[in-house]
Amino acid sequence: MEIFSSSWFWWLIAAVALFLIELASGTSIAFSLSVGCIAAMLISFADVSFSWQLAIAIFVSALCFIFVFALPASKRKRKNAGGQPYASNMDAIIGRKALVVEEIRGDGTPGRVKIDGDIWQALTTDNCTAPKGSMVEVCSYDSIILNVKIINQ
């Protein structure tokens, strides 16, 4: 059958296979390669040699990856309403208020605070005692222990 000997058919099969891999894996590389295969398939209708088709596939794949995924990713830094970048992980709790659920003693014995339903060990920054039920603000952290200051109520 002539369809199996046509290079456009194999480029189409490769593009579909790479697109399915993209759907399964979520990587931008497979999508970029799929776009490159589609470009090579289109150029194959002009009866250019396979080496040119391959060169077009590689070139278009690289351009797709750079302009669609790599460059915009550096510009996609999310910002909050004040225009500041969103903090993530442990940095996201700095500045947050917490409820003391287990007294933090001023002698360096950590107590426990609650933020969004999570319980954290905490020490006060000025070695003051923070009684149970008081509100504190997270100033920093050392490993998994939060450093907090008492909020004047």
Image (cartoon, helix red, strand yellow):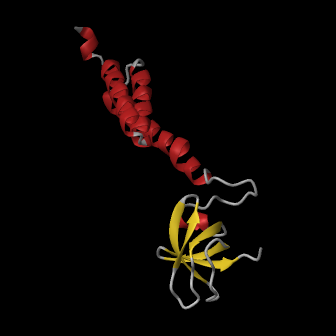
Front residue (pair 65, 94):
94
Quick check: 139 above or below 58? below
| Position of residue 65 measured from the top left corner of the image (x, y, whole percent) | 48, 43
In the image shown, does 129 or 91 lie closer to the viewer? 129
Q: Is residue 56 visible?
A: no
Kindly indicate the quadrant of the structure image that contains residue 52: top left
Which quarter of the figure is the N terminus placed in? top left
Q: Residue at x 57, y 85 (%)?
A: 105
Relative image position of residue 26 (x, y in whole percent): 42, 40
Tell me: 41 left or right of 134.
left
Query: Front-most of 8 and 142?
Result: 142
> Residue 136 location, x and y as percent?
66, 73
At x 53% / y 78%, what residue is drawn? 111
Which residue ends up furthest to the front in the rendered image? 132
All told, the count of numbered labels is 0
Whether residue 79 is situated above or below residue 53 in the rendered picture: below
As drawn, is 74 to the left or to the right of 136? left
